[in-house]
Image (spheres, rainbow, N blue to C red):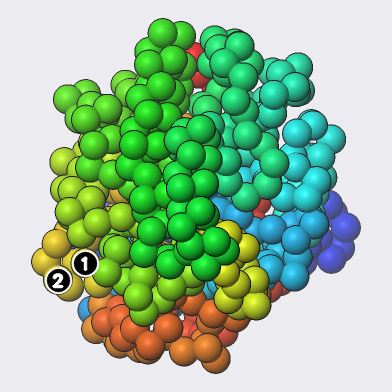
């Protein structure tokens, strides 16, 4: 069929709307995979045609397809990361919309949602669409971008189209950038009027400022990193998160609280109803599940994040909440900075670090430690992200869906080294860690973009689309 269509195209009897993409897409047949999908693991084949999953069954035959033997390997739906900072425009010495998506697909992340605290901040529809334009030309992964909120851009926020934008981002506590929304009247209007999912960074600004001054008076600029979780304190997190939840309940808002970091906050979330019925959802990040305060001595500012990494008990309680569905999704908050920037004194070192290349293999390490199942990993990193954000035709291995797929070898170990880090900043808090699992192949929209450490960059990712709902 493909050869027939190519001949028709060459003869100009038909002119496809997108001829280059139309002709380049191959048909693939993934054979004998352990398919991790919708709470089950079954052995079978997956046929990919024209960018989509055409058939899922045992014993599929397709003479024209390129066959990938997946015997002994596990096939996951592509990971969807709902919180990244890829730094373009304005901060491209840290990362950009080519380098960071490239790192993402090497780690099995096929789609991402990027934050608005770039330079300039994404506070108008024109600036928002400019980011989509850049990504369409550069990104190897599928993409969406949050519309940013400030104290004075309500009109722009309410123009946002919920069918082609993932959500509205509000910083309810200071972080990188200058996007703090601290006027209650503005928050009330956004929560009451926006039909979209509102994603929030929750830390109470006044609490943090008070704590900063206390430690600055004692230590000056050289505050030891071990005090970071006391400055960006659990009280600051709970005060802001509980306020956001209260406001969302008042206005029946679709609220998504990002990077939960404390055990106390978990009481705010409900696991008694299905995710698709929830109006208030929550996210845990890889660094809050992996690290705790004992790691500050060795890694120092390399693991400085906002909200701060906290205690071992917090880490353990977060994983429990992932397992029992109080926490709905897992993301990275990938936020690269250069090593020169990170190697500064406490108040000058920026918060954030690169994680998107290693998020899936980090979670698979928990599987090897018998802390989580493969099915739960697929649920929290793919299925639930698609359901929470109501993404069209992604997040599951289903016939007719876009073929965003990741083939993993659970028994192929490797060590994170500077030479194999793909993030533009060139470092990782996971350096020298040996992961037991490897991403072997990544498909984005049916295109085999990553295969055995090699990239095919001939196709770019697509803008994600969303179901229109109340």
- Residue furthest to the right: 12
- Residue furthest to the front: 218
Find residue 133 and report its horizontal and vertical position in percent.
Answer: 80, 49
* Residue 87, image quadrant: bottom right
Find residue 358 and report its horizontal and vertical position in percent.
Answer: 42, 71
Which residue is found at the position 74% from the left and 40% from the top? 122
Which residue is found at the position 34% from the left and 83% from the top? 433
User: What residue would you read off at disc 2?
Assistant: 369
Which residue is found at the position 31% from the left and 55% from the top? 310
In front: 84, or 297?
297
Relative to residue 169, is residue 361 drawn left or right? left
In front: 143, or 265?
265
User: What residue would you read off at disc 1?
Assistant: 366
Q: Is residue 236 visible?
A: yes
Find residue 393 and report its horizontal and vertical position in percent.
Answer: 48, 41
Q: Secondary structure at mark 2?
A: loop
> How far apart are the two marked residues, 1 and 2, measured between alpha carbons?
5 Å
Relative to residue 177, is residue 271 drawn left or right? left
* Residue 254, image quadrant: top left
Which residue is found at the position 75% from the left and 65% from the top? 92
In front: 283, or 99?
283
* Residue 183, image quadrant: top right
Find residue 9 and report its horizontal and vertical position in percent.
Answer: 81, 60
Query: On screen, 126 above or below 119?
Result: above
Q: Secondary structure at mark 1?
A: helix
Q: Is residue 80 visible?
A: no
Disc 1 and disc 2 in contact, CB within 8 angstroms: yes
């Amino acid at each position: 069929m493909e050869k027939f269509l190519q001949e028709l195209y060459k003869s100009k009897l038909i002119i496809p709307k997108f001829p280059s993409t139309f002709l380049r897409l191959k048909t693939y047949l993934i054979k004998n995979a352990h398919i991790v999908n919708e709470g089950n693991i079954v052995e079978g084949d997956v046929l990919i045609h024209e960018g989509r999953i055409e058939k899922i069954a045992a014993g599929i035959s397709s003479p024209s397809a390129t066959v990938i033997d997946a015997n002994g390997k596990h096939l996951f739906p592509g990971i969807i990361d709902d919180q990244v900072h890829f730094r373009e425009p304005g901060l491209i010495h840290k990362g950009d919309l080519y380098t960071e998506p490239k790192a993402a697909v090497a780690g099995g992340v096929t789609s991402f949602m990027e934050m608005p605290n770039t330079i300039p901040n994404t506070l108008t529809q024109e600036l928002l669409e400019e980011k989509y334009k850049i990504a369409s030309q550069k990104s190897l992964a599928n993409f969406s971008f949050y519309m940013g909120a400030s104290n004075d851009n309500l009109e722009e926020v309410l123009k946002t189209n919920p069918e082609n934008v993932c959500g509205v981002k509000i910083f309810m506590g200071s972080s990188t950038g200058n996007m703090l929304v601290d006027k209650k009247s503005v928050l009330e209007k956004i929560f009451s009027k926006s039909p979209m999912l509102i994603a929030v960074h929750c830390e109470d600004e006044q609490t943090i400022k008070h704590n900063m001054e206390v430690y600055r008076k004692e230590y000056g600029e050289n505050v030891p990193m071990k005090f970071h979780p006391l400055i960006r304190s659990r009280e600051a997190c709970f005060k802001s998160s509980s306020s956001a939840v209260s406001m969302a309940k008042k206005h029946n808002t679709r609220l998504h609280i990002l990077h939960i970091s404390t055990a106390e906050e978990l009481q705010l979330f409900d696991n008694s109803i299905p995710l698709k019925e929830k109006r208030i959802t929550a996210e845990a990040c890889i660094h809050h599940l992996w690290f705790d305060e004992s790691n500050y001595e060795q890694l120092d500012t390399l693991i400085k994040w906002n909200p701060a990494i906290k205690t071992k008990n917090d880490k353990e309680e977060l994983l429990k909440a992932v397992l029992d569905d109080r926490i709905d999704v897992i993301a990275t908050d990938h936020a690269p900075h250069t090593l020169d920037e990170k190697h500064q004194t406490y108040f000058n070192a920026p918060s954030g670090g690169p994680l998107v290349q290693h998020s899936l293999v980090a979670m698979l390490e928990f599987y090897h430690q018998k802390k989580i199942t493969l099915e739960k990993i697929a649920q929290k990193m793919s299925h639930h992200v698609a359901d929470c954000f109501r993404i069209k035709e992604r997040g599951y291995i289903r016939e007719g869906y876009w073929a965003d797929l990741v083939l993993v070898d659970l028994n192929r170990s490797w060590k994170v080294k500077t030479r194999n880090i793909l993030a533009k900043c060139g470092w990782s808090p996971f350096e020298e860690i040996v992961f037991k699992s490897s991403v072997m192949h990544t498909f984005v929209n049916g295109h085999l973009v990553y295969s055995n450490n090699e990239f095919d960059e001939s196709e770019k990712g697509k803008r994600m689309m969303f179901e229109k709902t109340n």
